[in-house]
Image: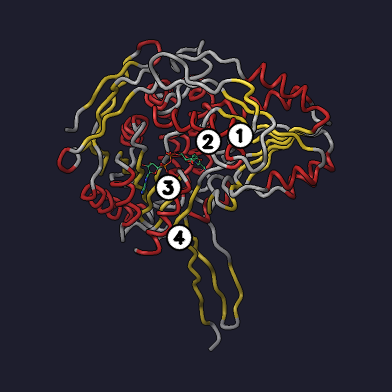
Amino acid sequence: MASSIVLNGSEGRPVTVNTGLFIDNEFVPSSGNATIDIENPSTGAHLATISAAQKEDIDRAVASSEKAFSTWKTSAPGVRRGLMNALADLIEKHAWELASLEAIDAGILYSDSMGLHIPQTVENLRYFSGWADKVDGQSLTIAEGFAYTRREPIGVCAGIVPWNSPLMITSWKLSPALAAGNTIILKTPELCPLFGQKLAQLVVEAGFPPGVINIVCGLGTVAGAALSEHMRVKKLSFTGSPAVGRQIMATSARTNLKKVTLELGGKGPSIVFDDADFEKALFWTTMGISVNNGQVCIAGSRIYVQDTIYDKFIKEFSARASKAVHGDPLLSTTTKGPVISAVQRERILSFVEKGLESGGALLHGGKAIDGPGHFIANTAFANVDQSASIMQQEIFGPFASIASFKTEEEVIAKANDSVYGLSAAVFTTNLDRAFRVTEAIEAGQVTVNMWGTVNANTPFGGVKESGIGREMGKDALDDWTTVKSVKYNLKM
Ligand code: NAD
């Protein structure tokens, strides 16, 4: 099975995607014609049937990537830059199709995709295209003469992508990988692979040589595992759950010690001091837990508010955060789509009982929305104990856990009392306090008076159990290259 299907996109316009695995610039059936059925999370109805990569298909993809690497690694930087910009242009041109696909198979609001995910994707490609001719080493003086370092591509790389912002996260891996001269196999999420099927068409149209970018959908336990075990994959960049991240690291240790970078979970604290611009803090904290239904690794899912403004804050936060227009993510009138699956909806709801058991006060939500699809009401608990599971575990849904604090020291200790360290937000108008708190917080990213921006030129990644390595920014290039020292004897 390697055909194409037509789906209904924004305003009923048709979007055509191929259903096969994208290997060597061709759409091919999977070995044994294995497939995966995809559903539309807004309706629960069957949406598409897509080829599912098996171990043999991953072997084929690796062979194709290896062949492509032999010439891609020495391609002129200008060639790589040109192709990356051509792909960025095509993504802009086909933005409505990509946004439609993210809406119908990931439940992402069309407006969010058009306004954030696609511009971010384009920006990442353009930003890293500019690095293609700047992946430089150092020139050094040594006793024997001189030396220089070369930042070289690693070889065949793999990127394993989650379902929550699939196109944008793909671009975080694809862009630095290509700029550095690697070839890459992207494993798209089995719950929503359609964006990748469309992206593959654009890769051909942009003119990339066969095998530089291979895109395969498949089960994590089959295709993902085959990539992580593969002896000829030299680097694997994984975004997903901490449990799978740990397995991937262990697999690397057991197989070929491939370089592994991990972007894992989070339980982001949003800290509101009483000297904050109240309106600004309300706006960003609400956004921080409602964007993409809170299915965001940097979600501001723990909200700590200074006791002097606590009662006022929870009243106004609840009035604002409980409002949502649930519906079809393709429609501009919808402000909240479904969560990704029935399993995920039940998992999120299971935390409502846990929140009540731990003595938290349910402020709003806590239930599914009647009707088809996986809709869930925005949910918030107040007066949450620091040790409660809803304050400690990543729920990955529209679920806020709120607590008060008295002092700066207390809130820093609470914010750092987490196995995670991905992102945090601080709301204050006191500059000295902003410096002190941002320094003390254990996280890869701290925002002041805003929540959660991602910028192509700014490194992104976690500390503690949130991950290893950085995506975006110049630092990401270090993770997609290896350093060779070349030494010349001029004296002996
Ligand atoms: P997941 O770990 O279930 O799946 C992520 C990807 O890994 C999917 O493509 C899946 O097919 C694959 N996979 C699953 N099992 C595998 C295995 N054994 N070997 C190899 N690959 C395997 O995660 P998810 O549910 O898709 O995503 C949600 C998680 O991702 C959350 O914990 C969230 O915080 C995290 N996340 C992190 C970031 C970040 O940048 N730090 C960004 C987005 C999501």
Residue labelled with disc 3: 178
272 is higher (above) or lower (below) than 338 = below
Figure disc tally: 4
Q: Residue at x 58, y 45 (%)?
A: 460
Q: Is residue 266 visible?
A: yes
On the image, which quarter does residue 102 sit in? Answer: top left
CA distance separating discs 2 and 3 = 34 Å
On the image, which quarter does residue 40 sit in? Answer: top left
Residue labelled with disc 4: 152
Q: Secondary structure at mark 3?
A: helix
Does any atom of ligand 1 lie closer than 8 Å to the CB of label 1? no
Contact (Cβ within 8 Å) of mark 2 with mark 3: no
User: Which is closer to the viewer, label 4 or label 2?
Assistant: 2
Q: What amino acid does circle 4 point to?
A: Glu
**Along the horizontal axis of the image, is 285 left or right of 407?**
left
Does any atom of ligand 1 lie closer than 8 Å to the CB of label 4? no
Residue labelled with disc 1: 301
Classify the position of ligand 1 by quadrant: top left, top right, bottom left or bottom right: top left
Q: Which mark is residue 395?
A: 2
CA distance separating discs 1 and 4 = 40 Å
User: Which is closer to the viewer, label 1 or label 4?
Assistant: 1
Contact (Cβ within 8 Å) of mark 1 with mark 2: yes
Q: What amino acid does circle 3 point to?
A: Leu
Q: What amino acid does circle 1 point to?
A: Ser
Residue 16 position in % (x across, y down): 29, 22
